[in-house]
Image: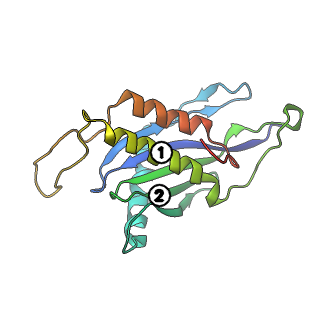
Amino acid sequence: MESRSPSIACIGIIGRHNNPLHISLLPVTGQDGQPNQERNRLEYTFMLNSSLDIFEARMPSKTVGHDFGLLHALDEPIALYGWLTNTGVKLIIVVDMGGRTAQTAEAGKTAILGLRTSDLTPAFQALQTAYIRLLRNPFYVPDDHDPRTTKLRGSLEITSSRFIKEVERIGRTWYPGITAI
C-alpha cells in the first residue's frame, strides 16, 4: 500500500474586488511522480469562490501581508489556506492531503502525513514575490476597475507566461516542511 502526502492542488489569485485573476490547477501525481489525473476546473473555482466570504469575515482593520491560515476544510482530503496582500489581492492555496505519493525511507525521506499552517508560509511568500515581480513589469496593467461600473482598465485575468510558469513551479515544488521556495 502506497502512502500519500500533501500537495498543492490549486493556486488562486483573487483581485481586491473578488474577481479571479489567475487559477492554476496541479494534477494528482502517481508513484512515478508523473501526473496521472487532471482536476476539475469548475469544482476548484467553486472552492475558491466559497472562501471569499471567510476572507470578508476575518478582514483585519490593517491589511499588510496577513496570513489567514486555514480558511476551511472540505471533506477529509481538501483544505483551503489564505493570504491577503497589502493591495487587497487574495492568495489561496488548496491542499490535497493525499495528492502526491509520499517519499519512502529508502529514498532518504520519510512521509509527512500532517500539515501545519506555517508549512504554507514559504509558498505564500514565493507567490507574493512572483506577484510583486509581475506588478513591476511596466507592460502589465494591474486589475484596476470598479465593479459597480463597466469601466475597465486592463485585463481582468493575468496572462503573463512568466508569472503563470512561476506559480506552477511553486505549486510543484512545495512540500510540507520546505523552508524556502
Judge the density around disc 1: few (<14), some (14-19), many (≥20) Cα neighbours within 10 Å: many
The disc placed on residue 83 is 2
How are the colours assigned in the image?
A: rainbow
Looking at the image, residue 40 sits to the left or right of residue 96; the answer is left
Task: Inspect the image, locate mark 2, and give the three-letter code of the amino acid beneath it.
Answer: Trp
**Measured Cα–Cα span from mark 2 to mark 1:** 10 Å
Sequence-wise first label, 2 or 1: 2
Q: Callout 2: helix, strand or loop?
A: strand
Locate residue 141: give its quadrant.
Answer: top left
Q: Position of residue 38 (x, y in %)?
A: 54, 31
Q: Residue at x 24, y 32 (%)?
A: 139
Judge the density around disc 2: few (<14), some (14-19), many (≥20) Cα neighbours within 10 Å: many
Tell me whether circle 2 and circle 1 mark residues in contact (CB < 8 Å). Answer: yes
| Residue denoted by label 1 | 127
Task: Inspect the image, locate mark 1, and give the three-letter code of the amino acid beneath it.
Answer: Leu
Q: Quadrant of the C terminus?
A: top right
- In the depicted view, which residue is nearer to us: 66 or 2? 66
Q: Position of residue 74 (x, y in %)?
A: 56, 57
Q: Residue at x 89, y 33 (%)?
A: 106
Locate residue 65: give its quadrant.
Answer: bottom left
Q: Is residue 59 visible?
A: yes
Q: Is residue 20 above or below residue 70?
A: above
Q: Is residue 139 above or below residue 89?
A: above
Q: Position of residue 148 (x, y in %)?
A: 14, 58
Q: Residue at x 62, y 41 (%)?
A: 174
Q: Residue at x 61, y 27 (%)?
A: 35
